[in-house]
Image (tube, coloured by chain):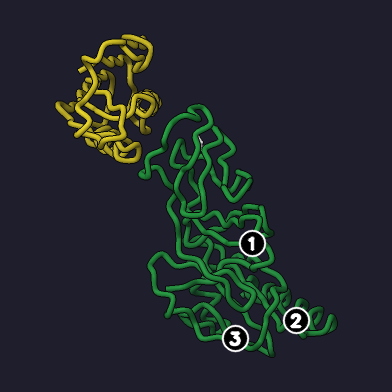
Amino acid sequence: MVLYVSTTLFQHHGDAGNECRASEKGPDSLAQCHRIRMEGRFDAAGMRRFAEGRAALLDLAIDTLDVSPTRFDSRLSGDEILLGMFGMACLLGPSGCVVTRFESLPA
Amino acid sequence: MWTPIALSEDVAAGTAAPARLGGAEIVLWRDGDGLLQAWEDRCPHRGMRLSFGFVREGRLTCLYHGWQFDASARCRLIPAHPELKVPGTIRANPWHVRERAGLVWVADAADADALPTLPDDTPMRGLRSLAVRRPRAAVAAQTGIGAGGWIWRDGALIGLHGADDATSMLHLALPQSATAEARRRTMGEATALRDALEAA
Ligand code: FES
């Protein structure tokens, strides 16, 4: 199995280009926006449920763009540390979901 | 519906203990002042049993990565990110919990008034919990314990709950004024009851 992670998970990219507008996550938030794409073998509905449940737990806004048995594509915004936790949770994944490629890019 | 699931004295201040109710896993824990909580026995981080954790300064700390939860069930500290203002969405799943007549009672829906009527003027003390390898319905039918999950018998309070499909728990409490001899006798009778239930 090849696991590819595009960068250090959710590392800060220095410029403000991927910072969400504060209004999206409240005035106190240092919100970041990331486009997260995963490839692998998924139960699509289970992966979606897992990802959206995790996002809710971590107080992240999630926009699920595409889900199939081999691909999960979403846009998330929220605290950078919590985005990192979200990525790690998806890599570990729900049972029955295997992630073979993971990309996190500033959105 | 409130259900008796443990003896109060089996959850000491500053400790956590596991319980099961109908297959659901529950952690009971007390802070240093003795305030009792009942939560789903599952850390919202990666699912570790919270009953493996420890209690420090009024918080239940998960054994795995040390996330700390206060009495409101909110996560207050993630040690790997001490600077993080933890969002209120990260929280354990609490049950409703009460203590009465020496027993711990839990419910998954709020209705304190539905607690069974027990004589408040008789301070009770837990005696012992006994596991019975019989389903709750069978034990209830043979002991006459109703849907409320408790019965008075010979001056003792007997609580009953189903831990899972095959196992029930009996919880015994006696008035605090009961003599050592009365406690010994009740203990013997309860053990005999358990053996008879399992032999039936
Ligand atoms: S599983 Fe509880 S802190 Fe990680």
- Mark 3, residue position: B120
At numbered mark 3, what does the secondary structure look like: helix, strand or loop?
loop
Q: Residue at x 67, y 68 (%)?
A: B129
Q: Quadrant of the N terminus of chain B?
A: bottom left
B198, B161: nearer the viewer? B161
Earlier-in-chain disc, 1 versus 3: 1
The residue sitting at the front extreme is: A27
The residues bearing labels 2 and 1 have C-alpha atoms spaced at a distance of: 28 Å
Question: What chain letter is assigned to the residue under label 2?
Answer: B
Letter of the chain in green: B
- Mark 1, residue position: B34
Dot 1, how many residues are within 10 Å of its Cα: few (below 14), some (14-19), or many (20+)? some
- Mark 2, residue position: B186
Q: Residue at x 64, y 68 (%)?
A: B7
Q: Are marks 3 and 2 on the same chain?
A: yes
The colour of chain A is yellow
Q: Nearer the viewer, mark 3 or mark 2?
A: 3
Image height check: is A107 above or below A22?
Answer: above
